[in-house]
Image (cartoon, rainbow, N blue to C red):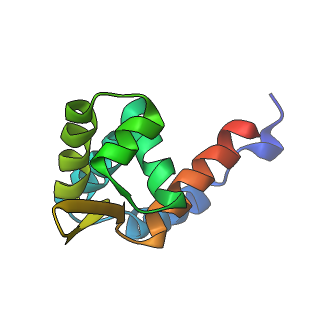
Amino acid sequence: MDTQYLPNPADREERINRIRDLLPDSERVVEELADFFKLFGDSTRIKILLALGASEFCVGDLAELLRMRHSAVSHQLRTLNRSRLVKSRKWGKNVYYSLNDRHIKNVLMQGFEHIRG
């Protein structure tokens, strides 16, 4: 093995310390981030988020759009709402859902970019 590519031990220690300073101090923050990404691990939730990235929907319209049962869509929306990925507003007898903020759509789009290469 060519030793010219092996890092100097002093450089290695400096690099480790520099990167350690960039990592979150709190394990709680890391766990919250892991929980955030777990929400994207369900294909039904991904479909719902993609639809809500395009337009606001009520449960019935989302169920029709995604060809799913009303109860299944409602269950996933509750999960997404509790996790603050979507927000809701009541209008008459209906509740309408939309993405909570543009960051959610950005995460989805970056995921698409990643898998498309």
- Report the quarter where the N terminus lies: top right
Where is residue 92? Give x, y as percent: 18, 69
Tell whether 9 sits left or right of 3. left
Give the residue displayed 22% in from the left and 57% down from the top.
Answer: 81
Q: Nearer the viewer, residue 111 or 4?
A: 111
Asked if one can make out residue 78 in the rendered structure from this viewpoint, the answer is yes
Q: Is residue 46 above or below residue 83?
A: above
Give the residue displayed 44% in from the left and 56% down from the top.
Answer: 52
Q: Nearer the viewer, residue 7 or 86?
A: 86
Numbered label tally:
0
Q: Quadrant of residue 84?
A: bottom left
Q: Nearer the viewer, residue 31 or 78?
A: 78
Q: Is residue 36 above or below residue 42?
A: below
Where is residue 2? Give x, y as percent: 84, 34
Where is residue 86? Give x, y as percent: 31, 60
Asked if one can make out residue 16 in the rendered structure from this viewpoint, the answer is no
Tell whether 93 sits left or right of 47. left
- Report the quarter where the C terminus lies: top right
Q: Is residue 117 above or below residue 100?
A: above
Tell whether 84 sits left or right of 40. left
Give the residue displayed 44% in from the left and 61% down from the top.
Answer: 104
Where is residue 13? Give x, y as percent: 50, 59
Give the residue displayed 52% in from the left and 66% down from the top.
Answer: 14
Q: Residue furthest front?
A: 92
